[in-house]
Amino acid sequence: MPTEAAVGLVFSMIRKDGILLFNEENQVLLTTMSTFQLFLDVYLASTYSECAVIFWTIAKELGIRESLLLSGKQIITSFTSALLLSMLFG
């Protein structure tokens, strides 16, 4: 996966519309990635973690500990499923 895709992943943790950064600079990044790489990138950006707004809302309602536990579970599940997809189809 291109290292330039990391920017979209990081910004998707702040706001989910950070995924739009994959479409930056006249779609240069998108055109250099294979279909599977693009799928995996968007999949990780949308599932790896909730955005900061959701994290703080959960923390406010259930407490910071519970929010961290849920985030950890989400990260593990997303990474594991992406790894399995890569092994099967990559």
Image: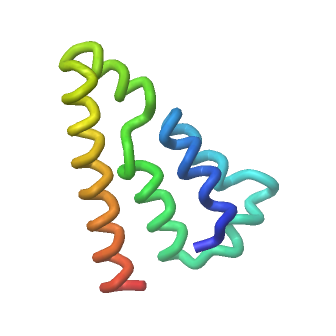
**Quarter occupied by residue 11:** top right
Q: Nearer the viewer, residue 83 or 46?
A: 83
Where is residue 1 drawn, in percent x and y? 57, 73
Q: Nearer the viewer, residue 75 or 43?
A: 75
**Quarter occupied by residue 88:** bottom left
Horizontally, residue 87 falls left or right of residue 3, namely left
Where is residue 73 drawn, in percent x and y? 22, 48
Horizontally, residue 13 falls left or right of residue 63, namely right
Q: Is residue 60 above or below residue 36?
A: above
Question: Looking at the image, which residue sits at the far right?
Answer: 25
Tell me which residue sits at (27%, 57%) in the image.
76
Question: Looking at the image, which residue sits at the far top?
Answer: 60
The colour scheme used to paint the residues is rainbow
**Quarter occupied by residue 38:** bottom right
Q: Is residue 35 above or below residue 4?
A: below
Q: Nearer the viewer, residue 38 or 56?
A: 56
Tell me which residue sits at (48%, 40%) in the image.
13
Horizontally, residue 44 falls left or right of residue 79, namely right
Tell me which residue sits at (44%, 29%) in the image.
52
